[in-house]
Structures are given as structure tokens and as C-alpha cells.
Image: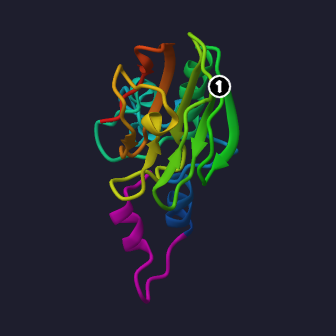
Amino acid sequence: MSNRTTLKAFFETDDVPTESQFADLIDSNLNLTDDTTDEITEGSTNLFESAAASTAEAEAGTEGSLRAFSPRNIQRAIAALQAINVIIDTPLITSGFTFSNRIYLLNLSSAVAFLPPASPSAGDQFGIIDATRSISSSVYCQIRFASSGVKFHGTNVNINIQKQDASVVFEYVNTATGWVIIRGSIT
């Protein structure tokens, strides 16, 4: 297998690539039918997963560097979130509404306001996952706790989730405390 620079050199203007150069090009690429991510390694580093967020980062909604979630790590994050007994809503959410006790996969193209679940009871949970990496400082998810008459960590505030790849789960405690974050973060 060759790196991209070597492969590109095989196919420059007026070059006539050989059979072995074409074979090298084919063998240097991932084939979803023939290869598994466990086979794509360099030493102890899995090259496929090194471009994706780690499981811990996926679960916490944090990132060590700019990367895309792999389908495998999204699956792991969803499995970890399911362990807290909240239903994952699979359609991508693009506009605001009142959340219920579910985890929502977001695909936002502009800032969108959401309301927390109405009439919550202690132990109720809801959450969001930035499934398409669309959240940013200008395209954010606003959760309107104060506007709905419930507190967030004991204060009357609305919060903006502006962190790309956010994965946050909230739980309702009581009237005085309101909703708290139990998994992930908003900063």
C-alpha cells in the first residue's frame, strides 16, 4: 500500500500507470466488502477510528480535535445513552418543539429554540445529540427552561448549546433545582 502522494504520482498527465500501480491504488483504499476496521491498523493504532471521536468523547460530547464521528462511535454513544433508559428518537430534528422524555438527533441549519418536557417528574430525562455536526456558535440549540417556567441547575435561565458534536442528557430533580446535566456538557 502507498500513501496519497505516491499514488497521485502514478496518474500524472501523460503517465501510463501499470497494472501493479492500479493494484496498489485499489489496495490502498478501504473496501467495505473486503475490509473490517480491525484490519486497518498501523502498529496499535486503528487508522479508521483515529479520524473519529473516541467512545469517551462521543459519550461526553467532547472532542480532542476536529474529527467526524464514525458510524461505529455514534452506535457506541447511542448504546451508552440507552443505558440511562431514555428512548432515542431516530428521525433528525430540524426545527423547534417541546421535548419529551427522549434523546433527539439534531440536524440544524439555523439557531432553533426548544422547550423542555412539560410537567416533568423527578427522574424524567431528555437529551440531544448533534448527529450531523451542525451545531456552532451561530447555529445552536437553545433550550428555553426559564421561558417554560422550570429551572436549570436552580436558576431561571435559557441555555444555548453551541458546541459541535454536543451530546447532552438532562434529568429533572425537583421544583427548586429543575433540570440538571447528567451526561455531557454544554461548554
Task: Identify residue for label 1.
Answer: 101
In the picture, the quarter occupied by the C terminus is top left
Q: Is residue 146 above or below residue 122?
A: below
Q: Is residue 46 above or below residue 154?
A: below
Amino acid carrying mark 1 in the image: Asn
Q: Is residue 158 visible?
A: yes
Q: Is residue 90 left or right of residue 36?
A: right
Q: Quadrant of residue 46?
A: top left
Asked if residue 7 is among those painted magenta in the image, a careful observer would answer yes
List x then y, in percent, for residue 103: 61, 31
Q: Is residue 49 visible?
A: no
- In terms of depth relative to the viewer, which is nearer, 17 or 53? 53
Instruction: Residue lying at the far front in this picture: please name it.
Output: 149
Q: Which residues are magenta?
A: 1-18
- In terms of depth relative to the viewer, which is nearer, 179 or 187? 179
Q: Residue at x 69, y 35 (%)?
A: 89
Instruction: Residue lying at the far bottom in this picture: please name it.
Output: 14
List x then y, in percent, for residue 169: 49, 25
Asked if residue 59 is among those painted magenta in the image, a careful observer would answer no
Magenta stretch, main secondary structure, is loop
Q: Is residue 181 above or below residue 142?
A: above
- In terms of depth relative to the viewer, which is nearer, 64 or 119? 119
List x then y, in percent, for residue 67: 38, 46
- In terms of depth relative to the viewer, which is nearer, 18 or 33? 33
Q: Secondary structure at mark 1?
A: loop
Q: Quadrant of residue 102?
A: top right
